[in-house]
Every structure is written in structure tokens, then in C-alpha cells.
Image: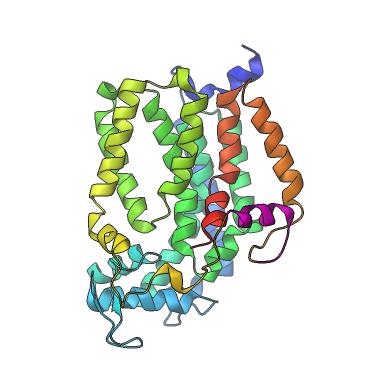
Amino acid sequence: MSQKANYLRLFYSVKFTPNVIVIGVILGLTFALQFFLVAQTFPLSELFGSASLLYIDNPFHEYNVAMGAAVGSVGYDPFFAAGRATGFALNHSDRLPAFLANILPSSLTAADIWKLYTFAVSLIASICLPLTLIILRFERNAIAISAALGLLLWWTGIFRWFHTAGMVSFIFIAFASLPFTALVVRLLTQAFTKTLIATVALGLVAAFLFFSHPLFPLPITVFLIFYLALNRQAVHWQFGLTALLAVAAIGILLNVGWLYYFMNPLEIQETFDLYQRATGGDLVIKSLLGIWDKANGARINTPIALAVIRILFSLFQQPTAVTFNLFWRWRVLAPICLYGRR
């Protein structure tokens, strides 16, 4: 095997010993820099103020948080949309902050909880990419570079716009699914007898992220299909798949309460179909070609797509090395373009 291939397969090495101090410094500096930048743009002075976030959809999401505090899991809106079924079990975009509003002291208003949630997600997102490489046992230079790229991804990409517009939970699971996917890979490549506690813990994390947003399983599922197909020799099939099924079972069983209403929506319950109803596989093609119709794309997507095709050809030579490289970029965009939903 070539030296390059060995480098890219470091996350399989059991001899890799991370320097805890160096890794802590990288994560700490990344977190501190993100805190400083977000504190300037949010701004920090308004975090504990009485004002609400009024950008684009934020008032709508804050109102959903208020409904979680007012009615709990399932109930009827007593205020603006009187008679509509609401509650954090029915609120798929703001379930986590609405749940927090229901259990936290009433001294914290819906505006307070929504602002704190929004601020916290922006900080968590900044360390997800370097944390992924730490889990995959990459060396410190790669981790440091990933931290810088993660910050650039946040401040120059479309994610910050979505976050500013109010799609906070969507952005949260988009970034959090990176280290989660890395943990799943580690689980698949180790014996189940050595990772029973890790399996249960990962199942609890999956349940938490699934509770945060119902689209969480999509990027994980797409990645796993390709990873299992291209890395058959690295997977402990008997133990790994058993652990994977256990993680999925824990994640689903702990979310049965709201999944029931997701699968059987009430007649007077707000659903996804009230907005962003454009669906279809043609959205992916139009987005790639930059055709502005039902889809919003850019012409630069075409050369990017050609580069991805080139990567696909190289999968047969170095499958493990490029699988993450490919899906870190495309794991969320394709499903969202296909379904056209939040």
C-alpha cells in the first residue's frame, strides 16, 4: 500500500495516540474564535436582553417555542392560531427548544430560550469537523486544518444563512451528523463485545439528534449505504451490524412519542405540506445546472459535480480514503434537494 493510502487510512490505526493537550488547544482555540465572532455579529449584548430575534423566520420559530412552554407535548394553541394542534411533539423543526421551554423555569421566556439555543448551535457547529477527524484518528495537522476549514464553511457557506433565517435545528443536525457518522464507522470496525457501552451511548446520541430534527437519519443512511458497499473488508459484519441495528432501535424507540404524530398527523395539525411543497428528482438536476425554477442552483455546481464523478472513479482504487471526502460535501444537499423540505 502506498504512503498516501496509509496516511488517509489513519483512522483504522490502533497505534495512533492523540496528544490530548494539543487536541484540546485546537478545539479550545476554534471554540473561542467562533465565540468571539458570533458575539460580535449576534451580538452578545442582546443574548440576555428582552428583544426577540426578528430575522426572516425567527419569530415563527420563537412562537413554536412559546407553544411548547404553554401546552407541553400536545395541545391546542390558545393564542395566535387558536384551536390549532401544537406542542413540541408536533413541532418537527423546533422540538428541542420547545421541549426545553416546557421543562425549564418560567423565568426564561421563549425569546431567551430561542436566542440561547441559536447561539449555542453556532458554537457547537464550529468544532464538529475537527471533532470528526479526532474520532477518525487523524494526526494533529489535519485536525488543525479541518478546524480552520470548518470555520470558513460556517462563515462563507450557505449554512450561516440558514441559521440566521431560523433553520437552527436543521443546521445543528447537519453539523452534528459528521462526528456521529465517524462514531458509527468506529463502531462498525470494532468487536461488539468491546463496545457494548459505546453502542448504548451512541444510541442515546442518535435518539437526541433524531429528537432535534426528523431529517437526521437521511445523511447517515446515505453514507452507510456507500460505506458498507465500498469497505466490506474493514467491517466486522456480525458484530458491527448488530451494534448498528441496536443504535437504530434505541434511536427510534426513544422517539416513538412524536413519531406517532409524524406518521399520523392530526387534521388540525400544521404539517410540512403547508410550505416548500416543490418535490421531485428534477430539483437535483436543476440545482446542479444552475437552472432557477423550483430549484435554486449555481453554475459552479456543474464543475463540482464533474469533480465528484472523478472521485467516484477513484473509489475503486482507494475506497476508504475518499468515501468521507465525498460525503462530507454531499451528504445533506442531495436529500434536501430531492425532498424540497426543511
Relative image position of residue 103 (x, y in whole percent): 23, 68
Magenta part, dominant SS: helix
Determine whether, in the image, residue 115 is placed left or right of residue 264.
Answer: right
Residue 16 visible, this orientation: no
Above or below, 290 relative to 129: below
Residue that appears at 49% across and 30% down: 227
Magenta residues span 281-293
Above or below, 45 relative to 29: below
Relative image position of residue 277 (x, y in whole percent): 51, 68
> Is 292 colored magenta in this rendering?
yes
Residue that appears at 35% across and 52% down: 210
Relative image position of residue 64 (x, y in whole percent): 36, 75
Determine whether, in the image, residue 154 is placed left or right of residue 49.
Answer: right
> Is 249 colored magenta in this rendering?
no
Front in this rendered view, residue 133 or 325: 325
Q: How is the image coloured?
A: rainbow
Residue that appears at 28% across and 72% down: 266
Relative image position of residue 92 (x, y in whole percent): 37, 64
Residue that appears at 38% across and 56% down: 214
Residue 266 visible, this orientation: yes
Determine whether, in the image, residue 13 is placed left or right of residue 260.
Answer: right
Front in this rendered view, residue 182 or 338: 338
Q: Quadrant of residue 42?
A: bottom right
Q: Residue furthest top?
A: 1
